[in-house]
Image: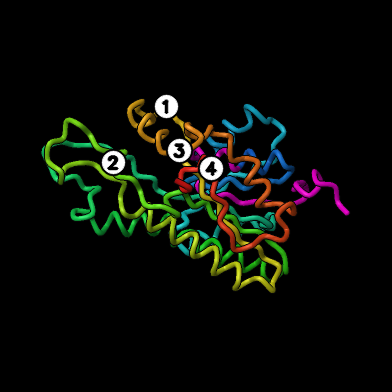
Amino acid sequence: MASPSSRYDLTGRTALVTGAGGLLGRQHVAALSEAGARVVVTEINLAQAEAAIAALKEAAPAADLIALALDVTAQDSVRAASEQLAGRGVTVDILVNNAAIDPKVTSSPGVMHSSRFEAFPVPQWQTEIAVGLTGAMLCAQEFGGQMARRGRGVILNIASDLGVIAPDQRLYRQPHVAREEEQPVKPVTYSVIKHGLIGLTKYLATYWADHGVRVNAISPGGVFNNQDPAFVERLTRLIPMGRMAEVDEYRAAVQFLCSDASSYMTGQNLVMDGGRSVW
């Protein structure tokens, strides 16, 4: 029987992380690399992927990282990335669907706020769905399909606590905005995408269960990143642990879900939100 620590070991495996240049994307890369994996760092253009690698290597110079341009919304781009890796003899064992557009909630007094549902632009809906949900489907289709044919693999979808609960729009209210229809809100797309990712997780977990492919999701809570103090105070009141997450606090969970430590777990959504969704 393998020791507990060895079950987290990803040496000899290759992971691919989409949207790897963002705040949490870099943390996912660092977590997988720390566990011994070679990691393909993807962004919509190569310069962004290379910049992410440069930043990551400052803390971990020996990390085995590959930069790759990947537009998750375009099937041709996903296939081209897959072919490019195959040409280099790289096989993807772990896929982390992280790419997303996380719209920042801001207020522009005097006009009906475009984040509000009544005024939400259809092109914005289509763009955000394409990146956050269709992109995950296309990457799973390509790389997950390869895993299924090989009989082994792991897919991790990065959802959110807002894929489990609805946004509390009171968090985003601005006292200087008099008209209700101009108050900023968390856009509808974010919740729909994150709920959809959890649904995709369950679908693929059962679809490929007999092909050795495990599919799980993680739903992180809010990460502290020097947000407005008033917002942080309002949010922490909703969290039983009384604080937001630190940026590196999800690393061990990613290692668990992507390694043999979770070998009997599939189709599940691991909620790490400081207890917010319990209240």
What's the CA distance linking mark 3 and mark 4? 24 Å
What's the CA distance linking mark 2 and mark 3? 14 Å
| Region of the chain picked out in magenta, as a range | 1-28
**Counting other residues with Cα less than 10 Å from the Cα at mark 1, is it few (<14), some (14-19), or many (20 or more)?**
few
**Would you name the residue on which mark 3 appears?**
239
Earlier sequence position, callout 4 versus callout 1: 4
Residue appearing at x 64%, y 62% in the figure:
266
- Image height check: is 118 above or below 31? below
**Would you name the residue on which mark 1 appears?**
226
Residue 99 makes an appearance in the image = yes
Residue appearing at x 45%, y 30% in the figure:
225
What's the CA distance linking mark 4 and mark 2? 28 Å
Name the mark on residue 170. Answer: 2
Residue appearing at x 43%, y 59% in the figure:
195
Which is nearer the eye, 208 or 161?
Answer: 161
- Point out the residue furthest to the right here: 1
Secondary structure at badge 2 equals helix
Callout in the foreground (1, 3): 3
What's the CA distance linking mark 1 and mark 3? 17 Å
Q: Position of residue 161 (x, y in %)?
A: 46, 48
Q: Amino acid at mark 1?
A: Asn
Q: Position of residue 229 (x, y in %)?
A: 36, 25
**Would you name the residue on which mark 4 appears?**
25
Earlier sequence position, callout 2 versus callout 1: 2
Asked if residue 114 lies in the magenta stretch, the reply is no
